[in-house]
Image (cartoon, rainbow, N blue to C red):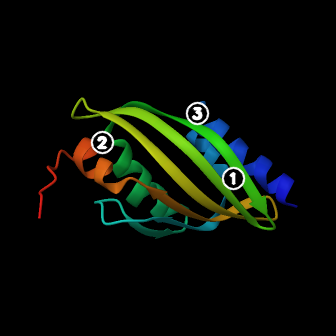
């Protein structure tokens, strides 16, 4: 099962890379739970496709100028879980590079993505995408 699930996750990344958001969203179960770790303006858990699109993807895309190019470096699968190590490259609306490293943990069942936990450099999100300055303690 893990090879099939890895193929579904790779397909999700391929669709995102092709700019096919509708195709990528079609791989999510309607009740998907998507968690972006950290304390950024878009961090949190989004449950269901409506919330995921309206409350996370739409606001986040407003911070990016152009496309995010996501490259999968490695997929590791066991049972229903697939871990993706990836690199993203983009420019933000502030004209800054947004080149982030990611770890995604996907839960795939019956050919659909049911859950995603996304880990990334949240300081880069704050500074490059939201124009905040880091303050030394």
Marks 3, 1: nearer the viewer: 3
* Mark drawn on residue 90: none
The residues tagged by marks 3 and 2 sit, at their Cα atoms, a distance apart of 18 Å
Q: Which residue is mark 3?
A: 17
The residues tagged by marks 3 and 1 sit, at their Cα atoms, a distance apart of 14 Å
Is residue 127 visible in this depiction of the protein? yes
Q: 10 Å neighbourhood of mark 1: few (<14), some, or many (≥20)?
A: some
SS at mark 1 in the image? loop
- Residue 121 picture location, percent across and down: 38, 53
Label 1 vs 2, first from the N-terminus: 1
Q: Residue at x 31, y 49 (%)?
A: 125
Q: Which residue is mark 2?
A: 63
- Residue 96 picture location, percent across and down: 26, 32
SS at mark 2 in the image? loop
Q: Which residue is mark 1?
A: 27
Q: Residue at x 61, y 61 (%)?
A: 105
| Marks 3,2: beta carbons within 8 A | no
Label 3 vs 2, first from the N-terminus: 3
């Amino acid at each position: 099962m893990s090879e099939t699930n890895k193929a579904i996750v790779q397909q999700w990344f391929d669709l995102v890379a092709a700019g096919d958001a509708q195709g990528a969203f079609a791989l999510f179960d309607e009740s998907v739970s998507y968690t972006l770790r950290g304390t950024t303006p878009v961090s949190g858990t989004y449950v269901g496709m409506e919330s995921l699109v309206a409350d996370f993807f739409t606001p986040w895309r407003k911070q990016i100028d152009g496309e995010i190019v996501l490259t999968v470096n490695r997929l590791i699968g066991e049972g229903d879980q697939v871990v993706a190590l990836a690199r993203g490259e983009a420019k933000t609306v502030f004209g800054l590079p947004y080149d982030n490293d990611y770890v995604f943990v996907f839960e795939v069942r019956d050919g659909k993505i049911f859950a995603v936990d996304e880990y990334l450099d949240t300081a880069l999100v704050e500074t490059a995408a939201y124009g905040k300055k880091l303050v030394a303690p």
